[in-house]
Amino acid sequence: MGKKTYDKAAFPALCRSHALPQPIPEVKFHPDRQWRFDWLFPGRIAVEIQGGVWVRGKHGRGEGIVKDHDKLNAAQCMGYIVLQFTPSQIVDGSFAEVVSDALGLRDVPPDHWPEDSPVSVPWHCKKIPSIVGSPDDQGGVA
């Protein structure tokens, strides 16, 4: 038997197997940017799958990390809870308890999408400028 890998197409079924509500894939959440969540659950619970963290992929290098910070900070200003997982945490199922706990924080019953879907919530936060600088810009850290 080979090593299991994260299969985006199988994620909704995996959520069902853990008694989680069905997430919506690739949700654009910001009115001015093209940012998308990998998955969005009811109650404004977003899931981001961060691949390549062990091989210095996009999410493991300076500029990618800063861009992720911009995106996640903006999402949190908009009232989202953003949970981040590696593909192996999805495959081994350890993500499910964390998502369940977050849904509980928002009192979201299983299989429930409120009428005021979180996808249509207007922007209530000042635009957060990107702070991507040059590779030698350490943000004042000595």
Image (tube, grey):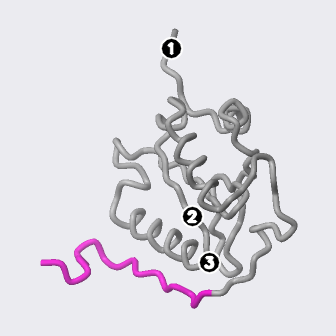
Q: Is residue 140 magenta?
A: yes
Q: Which residue is mark 2?
A: 81
Q: Residue furthest top?
A: 1
Q: Are marks 1 and 3 in contact (CB under 8 Å)?
A: no
Relative horizontal placement of residue 125, taking residue 25 as reference (left or right): left
Q: Which mark is residue 78?
A: 3
The kind of secondary structure element at disc 1 is loop
Q: Amino acid at mark 1?
A: Gly
- Answer yes or no: do the residues labelled 3 and 2 have beta carbons within 8 Å? no
What crowding class fits label 3: few (fewer than 14 Cα within 10 Å), some (14-19), or many (20 or more)? some
Report the number of numbered marks.
3
- 12 vs 61, left or right, is right
Q: Position of residue 46 (x, y in %)?
A: 62, 58
Amino acid type assigned to the residue bearing label 2 in the image: Ile
Residue at the spot x=39%, y=63% of the render? 65
35, 39: nearer the viewer: 39
Extent of the magenta region:
125-142
**Which residue, given by chain and number where applicable, does mark 1 sit on?**
2
User: How far across and how far down the image is residue 120, in percent?
Assistant: 80, 73
89 to 79, vertically: above or below = above
SS for dot 3: loop
Residue pictured at 40% horizontal, 49% vertical: 57
- The picture quadrant where one finds residue 79 is bottom right
Q: Answer above or below: position of 21 versus 17.
A: below
Mark 1–mark 2 distance (CA, rounded to whole Å): 34 Å
Mark 3: amino acid: Met
